[in-house]
Amino acid sequence: MEQEMEKGKESEEKWVHDTSVDYKGRVPLRASTGVWKASLFVLAIEFSERLSYFGIANNLISYLTKVMHEDLKTAAKNVNYWSGTTTLMPLVGGFIADAYTGRFYMVLFSAFVYLMGLSLLTMSQFIPSIKACNTSICQQPRKVHEVIFYLSLYCIALGTGGYKPCLESFGADQFDDDHLEERKQKMSFFNWWFFGLCFALLLGATVIVYVQDFVSWGVACLAIAIIMAITIIAFCMGKSFYRYRRPEGNPLTPILQVLVASVRKRNLSCPSNPALLYEVPESERSQGRLLKHTSRLRFLDKAAIIEEKNGERKESPWRLATVTKVEETKLVLNLVPIWLTSLTVGVCVAQGTTLFVKQAAVTNLKISKNFKIPAASMASVSAAGTIIAVPIYDRIIVPILRKVTGNERGISILKRISIGMTLSVMLMVVAALVEAKRLRMYTNHHTMSVFWLIPQYLILGVGDSFCLVGLQEYFYDEVPDSMRSLGMALYLSVLGVGFFLSSFLIIMVDHLTGKNGKSWIGKDINSSRLDRFYWMLAIINAFVLCLFILVTKRYTYKAVQRRGMDTDCHKIDEVEMVG
């Protein structure tokens, strides 16, 4: 018996038995596949994509107002619509990847679509017939340029639809959840993923934006297109190192089956002993992990009640579901209140690429007599805040908290998110106070130094290291294993809906306050009252934070049946109650 256990442990250490396969469709060899050797290729292509995205997004509102001659409200709305689309399209791409194509091939397809968008954007800056103007100062851009420009932007948005949900989940798939060391490395992966993302933001908001403002948009677009092409080639070269997950069909079908089965058996009583509910033995399970039974949403347990008729068991999936399928349905339903109460995070993030940029544009941007920074480069302060916060949290705070709390993560995912949401409230308060001071200085014919905006950008960056990283972990870990690309898409949809909500709030605030003749969102920032708009966002965020804390009080994490090789004594979120 002991010899068999030893052989089992040796097999677990040599091979990866988490339903993933290598590039030839075989069980992956642990030593030569996955972990950091594979995820570094993923981080590289993510870096180039984020460099491209932030290089465009951070300065887009300036391009729309200066070259396209759109007013502040129209430009802010168009930026929010595009940003919202780029973060909502992943819902479609994530679903297709989980159900049919798999993550690797969806990433490849989307990367080429993204590159096509960048190529169109580059051509719109160089080809004379589709340039905005043939003069250095553009009074009225050509209609064809406007069409090509927006076409390229939404081509990039389409590419992001398959790229973003699959790439991060594909990177996390390189770590085995049932192997203690790899599971800890995966927790660090999300931190370092966001670190790389913010390093791309730093370069995008400084180098790329500087080139856009003081050289040309064409050169900047050409540079990011070349970098993207190089990293796509590198990503393909890492094919033999990756661990792949096979698509498992439509992930929504099992959820519908559980709902139908539970309604059909609504008149039956749940057994007092959960062991009497139907479950496929782990030895017979071909895909995914088994989940433990939980006491939440007990009505759904009826789907797993075993019925006997004429000595035969009814096993139609629309009549009988396993405990694991029931628990996966509970997971999806439990996502809804967390998703809804996280939307204001996206609203705050939206300000960083719209109104914060216009704030910076009317300040004194000179940091010396001979050097002036672009307004959009202030986003680099936010990136710097995250770049500093993530290593400190991952390497110093988490090890200390692990010893104190006994939790592998240091603190639970939802507590981490709540800290970030608290910082979002602080962010809007600070932004309101700074804008009020700027308006007073403007009234007295003084110009505020751009350094006054540093605190709000720093808070934005540090808050993202808690909130956005926490949301990434949550929507990867707390969805069914077969829905992880869709889970990352749900995370991105928090930001996407947040961008659309920001546009909606701008429209409503402008409409309501404009009735009195003094709109909070005027044609330019000096005729606006953004301080009042920020105070409104602070109050909304504080209210939603209270709702979020109430929701998490009764939240129960996913409970996975671990394999025998996992002997770690630390608690994990799956068995911890938040609050």
Image: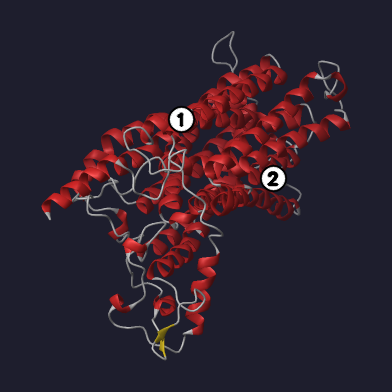
Taking 9 as reference, is 345 left or right? right
Colouring convention used in this rendered image of the protein:
secondary structure
- Which element is circle 1 on? helix
In this rendering, position of residue 452 left or right of residue 188: right
Residue at x 70% of width, y 52% of height: 513
Question: From this viewpoint, is residue 201 visible?
Answer: no
Which residue is identified by label 2? Answer: 81
Mark 1 residue type: Gly
Residue on which the image places disc 1: 196
| Disc 2 from disc 1: Cα separation | 26 Å
Rendering coords of residue 247 (x, y %): 52, 52
x and y, in percent, of residue 570 in the image: 21, 50
Q: Quadrant of residue 119?
A: top right
Q: Which residue is pictured at 88% across the width and 32% down the height?
A: 143
Q: Residue 318: x, y in percent?
A: 52, 76
Circles 2 and 1, Cβ within 8 Å, touching? The answer is no
